[in-house]
Image (spheres, rainbow, N blue to C red):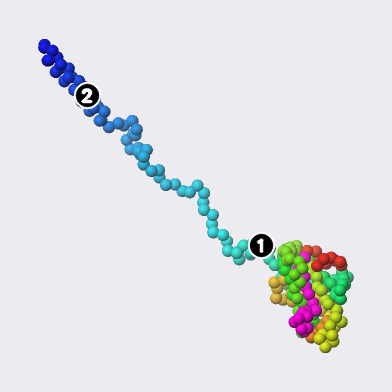
Amino acid sequence: MTPVTRHVLGTTVFLCTALLAAACSSSPSTSGTSLGSTPSSAPAASSAPATTPAPPSAPASATASAGVAGCSSRALKAKVDTAQAGAAAGSTYVPIDFTNIGSSTCTLFGYPGVSAVDSPSGSQLGRAATRNPAASASLVTLVPGGVAHAIVQVANAGNYTPSQCSPVTARYLRIYPPNQFTAIYAPYTVQVCSAKLPHKIGSQLSVYVVRPGPGKAGQAP
């Protein structure tokens, strides 16, 4: 065999070997997946959120109704405690005590409405009490038998001229508990102006916010 022949045969063998290797490497590989499996590049199936979304907030009215109700007039007894009255600067300061006579806990918040009358069936004498903002209102909770109070300032009728005041004797205070429309009548005898004082003067009566506990003489309103 000549050198040229040996060179041609060697080249042919090399080319066949390379072609066989290329053919083998082009066959599909099954090492990455098995039959019927999901390719690793496929997106994962969607799943439910990790936590359940919170329900919408309850309406304000439902929230309020779930709490303790305000004290109704029929659930309260009102007393003007003259034994705990005090005097200063031409006025008398007297507490109105509110007692929860109902069977359920209730709340009071803010100012009672107060005016003077000569009898439970009588008409109002003078102007109703104005609200004194000296103290901020806070919620007062009354268990059955519990007591709260509001101070009423009554200016002396003698502070005004007879023509302005037309003084008479009142026998009761007509009291509307905070946020109520039914009056409670509490006995209280005092000289009041039957006439409505001029607006620049205001009312002879002034009321403070409801506070916890019974009223005490010398206690800040």
Q: Residue at x 51, y 51 (%)?
A: 52
| Residue 60 position in % (x across, y down) | 60, 64
The residue depicted at 74 percent of the width and 66 percent of the height is 136
Q: Between 206 and 178, which is closer to the camera in this rendering?
A: 206
Q: Which residue is mark 1?
A: 67
* Left or right side of 48 for 124: right
Q: How many C-alpha atoms fall within 10 Å of the one at disc 1: few (<14), some, or many (≥20)?
A: few
The image quarter containing residue 200 is bottom right
Q: Give the residue type at disc 2.
A: Ala
Identified by mark 1, the residue type is Gly
Which residue carries the number 2 mark?
A: 18
Residue 39 drawn at (x, y percent): 35, 38
Q: Residue 28: x and y, percent?
A: 27, 32
The reply to whether residue 36 is in sight is yes
Q: Is residue 186 left or right of residue 50?
A: right
Quadrant in which the C terminus appears: bottom right
* Segment colored magenta: 196-211
